[in-house]
Image: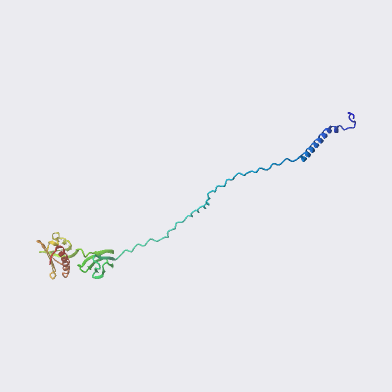
Amino acid sequence: MSDEQEPNQDPQSSALRPFLVLAVLLALAAAAAGLWWTLAPAPPKEAPVARTPAPVAAPTPSAPVAPEAPPAPKPRPTRKAEAPATSAPAAPAVPTTGELHIDSDVPSAMVFLDRKFIGNTPTTASDVPPGAHHLNLTAEGFDGYSDDIDVAAGPADVMVRFKEIRLNEKVNVVHKHAFGSCEGRLVADPQGIRYETTNKSDAFSMKYAEIETFEVDYLKKNLVIKKRGGKQYNFTTKAENADPLFVFHRNVDKVRQQVAGVKR
């Protein structure tokens, strides 16, 4: 075969021929390699290695969690109770009469007010008109009690002590002088007798032990008081009779005998 180029041969196809040969060779090589891979014996498989699993720590029990308490309800604002409107209390009525609570140191003494029996002690005399009244009490084994009291409106307590020496006697008198007279009042208490008058030179005061004569003449309406070793006084009354002098003498003489030890 001659090295000379054929006159009708395409110059472009001559240039592509080496590339086509290379492509064919690569395809053949790839086919050979695949055939060898298919026919080659498979390598032995390694036996699987048993692995011991790592111990898993048991979960630590946790303290029970208390359920969360629901929030406390907010207190509702309370309204202060409004006090009901009240009218001002009526002023207590002013008493117009007296009320005497009468008692004594001797139980069940009989009580008389203005000579009217009221009851036995302790007792109460209600609706007593204000003003002067006469009170009497009697108890068995004791001298009677007699006194003029002035009652005021409202309550009052009266305590009578029979076991004590007591005396409060008064009588309006006229002192008869040798010439003329003067008026005054005889007053007796457990300490003695005194004569109260505006004529200061005629006034006197005597203890029972100082009295030498103490006598009353009912018919002559005359009361005689003589101081031991001293002056004598003669008293009369403007009353219709000698009753005021007689009562005064009787009540005073009882105490006089007790205090001074005078025997009749």
Residue 128, horizontal then vertical, whole percent: 27, 67
Residue 231, horizontal then vertical, whole percent: 10, 62
Residue 51, horizontal then vertical, whole percent: 64, 43
Q: Is residue 116 left or right of residue 175?
A: right
Q: Nearer the viewer, residue 107 or 186?
A: 107
Q: How is the image coloured?
A: rainbow
Which residue is outermost to the left?
229
Question: Looking at the image, how many numbered discs can be counted on the residues?
Answer: 0
Residue 85, by quadrant, is bottom left
Q: Nearer the viewer, residue 66 or 156?
A: 66
The quadrant of the image that shows the N terminus is: top right
Residue 105, by quadrant, is bottom left
- Position of 65 relative to 155 (above/below): above
Residue 18, by quadrant, is top right
Q: Is residue 57 left or right of residue 197?
A: right
Residue 177, horizontal then vertical, whole percent: 11, 64
The quadrant of the image that shows the C terminus is: bottom left
Q: Nearer the viewer, residue 229 or 47?
A: 47
Q: Is residue 209 left or right of residue 51?
A: left
